[in-house]
Amino acid sequence: MKPLFAKFKYFVVAILAITLTACGSTPQTTVALSTNVFANPDLKVGVAYIEPASQATTHIYGAGCLLCYGVASALTAQLDTHLKSNIDHSELENIKNLVVERYKLKTKNVSLVELPVPVNKMKKFKGELGFANKDFRSLKEKLDIDVLVVLEITEHGAFRSFSNYIPNGDPQGHISGLVYGIDLKTNAYVQYMKFSETIQPSGEWDEPPTFPSVTTSYYQALENTKQTITEAI
Amino acid sequence: MMGCQSTPYRDDYAKHTNQLRGNYIQPDQYQFKFAAGKEIDLRGAYSSNTDTAATPVMYHGGAGLVGLALQVGIHSAMVQSGREGQLSEQQQQANESISAAINASKSFSLTDIAGDHASDIAEGDFTPESVIHVKPIFFGQTDHSKLSLKTLVWIEWPEKLRKKKKKLKHAYLYSNLIHVHSNLLSEEQRQQFQSGDSDALKQQLQSMLQTSLDIAKAELTGQYKDIKGASKTFFLKESDNKKVIRGVLVEETCNHQVVKNLHQWFVVLPKGQTSTVGNECALAHSQVGSDA
C-alpha cells in the first residue's frame, strides 16, 4: 500500500510543479514598433483582424462566486440588452482600417488578410520573450507576406467592477484587445501592444432604456483606443 | 443591492423631460428666474470617477438568510459611503485649486452678466409654473485651461399636479441641461483666471451664460422642435485629451456648434482652440464678403 501512496504523492507533486511553473512564465511586455523592418521597400505586410467573440456586453470582474456573478449579471441585464441591440461592430471596423492606414505610412505593400486557421489552433512556438508563442512562420508562403499584423479585439461594451455582490462603481465604457506584428522569417515580434480603455460615464449611468452616459463613454473608449494605436504605429 | 445601482447624487445633473407636448412658450411670454439666487456658483472641475478599490469581505456562512442579507447590506453601505466621500473630497480639492477665481466671482452677480436676457427675468409675484427655473453652475479646470457652464433648466408642473409629484412619472413638466464649453484659454487668459482677475472672469462667464440662455429660449419657444437625425461623433479638444460627444447637430455659428447629445442635453462646442476664433470668424466673413 505504501509504495502506491508514495507514487500518488510524487504524481501530485509533479502536477503541481508543472502547473506552478506555467504560472511563473513571464508575460510578454510591450514591444515598440521596430522601424528596421521597414528599411526594405518591398516589404509586404498583411493585416489580420480578429473580431470579439461576443456582442457588446458588460464585462463583470470581481464577482467571485457563482451566486455573486448571477447577482452582478442581473444588475447589468438591462444595460446588456441595450449594448447588444445598439452597438454593432462597425466602429471596430474603423479601428481595423486605422491600423491598415497607419502601416501604409510605413510601407506601400499593405493588405488585409484572412488567417487560414484560428490563432489558438496554430502550432506552439518555443521561443524566448519577444517571440510569438504560436508558430506563424508558415504564413509567409501561404499569404505571401513578410510581416503579419494582428489586431484582436477581445472585449467591448462596458466594464463593471464588483466586490462579490457589491459593485465598486458604475459600469464604464470599455474596449480591450491587442495589436501585434510578427516577422514571419523569425517569428519575432516587431510590435506587441495590449490596450484596455475603461471610461467613467459622466453623471448618472442608470438611465434605461438608452443609457446615454455609458453609451457615450463607450464611444470615448473607442476614440482613446484609436489615439493609442495612432501613437503606437 | 439595488441601492448599489445608483451613482452618488450630483446637483449639476438633470434628466431630460419634455411634457410640453408641442405647447411651446410664446416668445413674448417667456420669463425666467435664477433658481438658486443671483450669486455666481463657480466650482473646480473634477473627475467624476467614483470607483472605489475592491473591499473584500468574508460573509459569515452560519448567519442564515437574514444574516446574509444584513451582511450584504452593511457591505453595500460601506461601498456607497466610500464613493460619496471620494466625490466630496475631489470637489473640495478642485475648489481649492481655483480659489482666487471663486473669490473674484463674488464681485458680480448673475443679473450683471445676463446681458440682453436681463429683460426676461421674472419680477414681482408669480407662480412657480409660470416661469422657467434656471440654475447656472460654472466650472473651472484645475489647470486653469478652460471654463464651462452647466445650466439646469426646468418648468414646474401646475400646482394641482405638483401636489401629486410623487405619483407623476416625471418630476417636472420640462427639464434639461445646457452645457457650454469655453475655448481653451490663451496663456494670458490662464494667468488672469489663476490670479482671479474679476473683469476678465466676468467677461468669460457672461459669454457662456448668454449662450446658454439663448439656447434655453430657442428650445422652449419651439425653435429646435424639428431637429432629428442619426447620432454622430463630435469632438471637444481639452488640454490633455479629446472628449467625445455623441449627438445631433442642432445649430452652427462661426464660433460654436450646438449638439443635442444622447441625454437630449444641449452641448455647446467651441469651434477653435483658442480665443483667436473670433478673429478667424471675422476674417472668414470679410473674405466671403469680398468674394461676393
Image (spheres, rainbow, N blue to C red):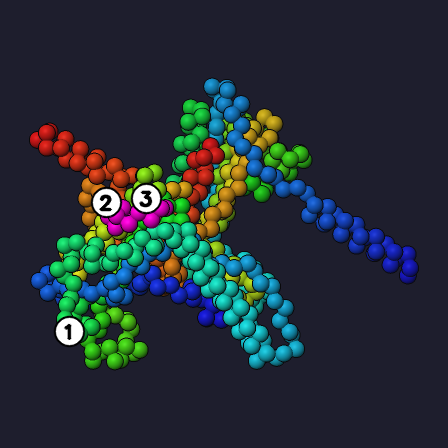
Label 2 neighbour load within 10 Å: few <14, some 14-19, many 20+: many
Question: Would you say B213 lies left or right of A169 here?
Answer: left
- The vertical placement of B199 against B283, above or below, is below
Is B253 one of the magenta-colored residues?
A: no
Instruction: Provide the major secondary structure of the magenta segment.
Output: helix
Q: Which image quarter holds the C terminus of chain B?
A: top left
Residue B59 picture location, percent across and down: 62, 71
Query: Is B44 or A195 nearer to us in this picture?
Result: B44
User: Tag 1's secondary structure?
Assistant: loop
- Figure quadrant of residue A78: bottom left
Q: Which circle marks residue B125 in the picture?
A: 1
What residue is rendered at 31% in x and 42% in y? Answer: B189
Residue A85 picture location, percent across and down: 37, 56
| Callouts 1 and 3 close, C-beta under 8 Å | no
- Residue type highlighted by circle 3: Gln
Question: Would you say B134 lies left or right of B60 here?
Answer: left
Q: Are the numbered discs 1 and 3 placed on the same chain, yes or no? A: yes
Is B193 one of the magenta-colored residues?
A: yes
User: Tag 2's secondary structure?
Assistant: strand
Give the residue number, with chain letter if any, for mark 2. Answer: B256
Earlier along the polypeptide chain: callout 1 or callout 3?
Answer: 1
Q: CA distance from mark 1 to mark 2?
A: 37 Å
Residues shaded magenta: B192-204
Question: Would you say B32 lies left or right of B233 here?
Answer: left
| Callouts 2 and 3 close, C-beta under 8 Å | no
Give the residue number, with chain letter if any, for mark 3. Answer: B192
Label 1 neighbour load within 10 Å: few <14, some 14-19, many 20+: few
What residue is rendered at 14% in x and 35% in y? Answer: B285
Q: CA distance from mark 1 to mark 3?
A: 40 Å
Q: Are the numbered discs 1 and 2 placed on the same chain, yes or no? A: yes
